[in-house]
Amino acid sequence: MNKKLYVDVKEVCEDWGVSRAQGYKMIKQLNERMLAMNPNLIVLAGKANRKFYEENCYGTTKQA
């Protein structure tokens, strides 16, 4: 299975069992954290970088 570069709210909700609103809050927090580390990055509203998401939510890269 070919993984996309970004995680969307649907995947966050499935992974964590949260509502869409909470999923969007989690994505926003991840994007803010990523921008704090490097302000030159480009982020997309409602999507999070997959590698950053997996490292920050699971502690390591999630293996498929």
Image (cartoon, rainbow, N blue to C red):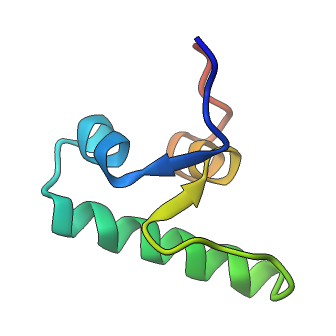
Query: Which quadrant, please, contains the C terminus?
Result: top right
Query: Which quadrant, please, contains the N terminus?
Result: top right
Residue at 47% across, 76% down: 29
Q: What is the total number of numbered labels drawn onto the structure image?
A: 0
- Where does the image place residue 15, in percent across and percent down from the top left? 32, 36
Q: Is residue 47 above or below residue 13?
A: below
Residue at 67% across, 43% down: 5
* 10 sits to left or right of 60: left
- Where does the image place residue 48, in percent across and percent down from the top left? 55, 59
Residue at 25% across, 46% down: 13
Residue at 17% across, 42% down: 17
Quarter-wise, where is residue 10 in the image?
A: top left
- Where does the image place residue 36, in percent across and percent down from the top left? 72, 86
Say which of 46 and 37 sits in front: 46
- Where does the image place residue 45, in percent across and percent down from the top left? 49, 75
Q: Is residue 49 above or below residue 62?
A: below
* 58 sits to left or right of 20: right
Q: Is residue 19 above or below residue 14?
A: below
